[in-house]
Amino acid sequence: MPTDIQIFAEGSFLGMLKFEADVFTIVSHYELNKKAPAGIFDEYVIQVLPDAKKDSSYWTNNQLLKNTSEEKSAYKKIEIQNEKDSRSLSIGLTSLLYGKKFSSNPLSYYAFNRVEGNALSFDLNYREPLNKRSGKAEVRYGFDDKKIKYNLEYSMRFFNDRRMWLSGSVFRSITPMAFDDLLPLQEFYNTFKALFDKRDNLDYYYSSGYNLRLNYRFIPQLSGRLDFNQAKQTTAYKNTNFSFRKSDVEFSENPPINDAFLRTIDFRLFINPNKFRAIDWGDGDISRFRITNFPSMRIGFTYSGKDAFNSTYEYRRIYGSFGGQNYINSFMKIRYEVGGEIMTGQVPYQSLGYLNSRSGTIDTDVIFLATAYNEFRGDRIYYLNFQNNFGKMLWGGVPVLKNFNLIGFFNAGRNFISEENYELAAFKGFRISDGLYMEAGFGISRILDIFRVDFAWRLNNPYKDNKRFVMNLSIGTF
């Protein structure tokens, strides 16, 4: 009986956004003369004529192609190995795995920074196949700030194609400014720099509360996200000057924030007008891939209210971005993004917008490569990012270098702040750009397949002591 299906669909959203999609699927776990399981193919019915006498049990016992003894032996070995894997323990530097659902991150068990001093933590992660359910539990203690932190997260995905995702978290944490969370590798690198070079590259504050989030994909070209956040945010202070080297040098002070109780609601839309194809593998997994290269868009709105939400500060934030990537030939693979945000009302320092700059750790998805961490902040931010992947144009025949890619980039940005929000800010050690900030340079990517080194020059707005050149290490394969 046929179970492979191909469906081609086209349509429009609100008469403006057109979309097309090809979907391949395998209908499984079906019943005769009944609708298929709920999901993309709800209306598909496998019909059998009324006089048919052979059901699925007949075909099970009368297979046209029966398994050979070698195939039966192979299937038995697979079952035994799967059973072993479900109880196995695997220990590595960056991951500790138990079975197929539980994991932990040994790289994050120890950390050091100028606020907590020495900090010990333990995390346990749970993930079901296809991320249908996942969870995280983390506890942490800082020996110099003498505070316990924790984070409990849980998420669920709904429907066969997992188009809806509901998650929530309860936390009491030390939060790096401009980061929702740090990768274990980033925190490990920052720990190393702080202990041996007396350089803690991040700024911190304390935050405790909860978060609820709903993601929903209406169609492949349109999805949305709704967040509700409640957090009590307080200033964190430097508590140690310990270091293995440079004991006579002091850490910089951790900047203050505007202590606040904030309840915020955030709504955003993701619009991707590209054509997609998909393969349903029949086990609940659906692989989608884009077949066109139109730019995508992100728009959002954030609100914090005194009367409606009892927040300390009332402000509104409208933000958005427009960008994509195009393959022209082996030397012209372009990536670009234009975006910005506008904030009105009383905006506390920790909620101000910022140019997405390198942090001094091993970053991911960095746009500005020559700016310093938290250097440009404000209540109005605009930016342009342009990169081109020249591939192996200069060294394609050199054995050691032939796997590397040469990247050229140009970035520009502008920030502003109202007089009211500048006076409100608890910390004023940020800069307002003199005109349009610009930088350019080149990078080498796919070093050990994952790392990228960039060499960036400020074209204007030089840093302290007229510094214009920066070299930066990040994770990226573009």
Image (cartoon, rainbow, N blue to C red):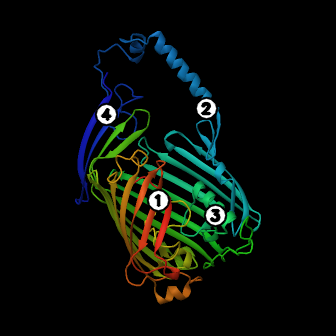
Q: Which circle, 1 or 2, is nearer the viewer?
A: 1
Residue ID for mark 2: 86
Looking at the rendered image, the disc whose residue lies closer to the viewer, 3 or 4, is 3
Residue 86: image location, x then y, percent: 61, 32
**How far is disc 4 from disc 2 in space, using C-alphas?**
35 Å
Residue 54: x and y, percent?
35, 14
Q: Give coordinates of residue 302: x percent, y percent.
A: 46, 71
In this view of the protein, which residue sits in the foreground, 413 or 13?
Answer: 413
- Res. 32 image quadrant: top left
Q: Is residue 55 above or below residue 477?
A: above
Q: Secondary structure at mark 3?
A: helix
- Give whichever of discs 4 and 1 has the lower sequence position: 4
Q: Which residue is mark 3?
A: 193
Q: What is the tally of numbered marks visible in this picture?
A: 4
Q: Which mark is residue 453?
A: 1
Amino acid under disc 2: Ser
Task: Tell me where residue 390 sits by quadrant.
Answer: bottom left
Are there few (<14), some (14-19), or many (20+) residues within 10 Å of tag 4?
A: some
Q: Earlier in the sequence, mark 2 or mark 3?
A: 2
* Structural distance between the alpha carbons of marks 3 and 1: 18 Å
Q: Nearer the viewer, residue 47 or 222?
A: 222
Task: Specify which label sits upstream in the sequence, 4 or 2.
Answer: 4
Asked whether disc 4 touches disc 1, contact meaning CB atoms under 8 Å apart, the reply is no
Q: CA distance from mark 3 to mark 4?
A: 59 Å
Q: Nearer the viewer, residue 468 or 357?
A: 468
**Foreground tag (2 vs 3):** 3
Q: Which residue is mark 4?
A: 44
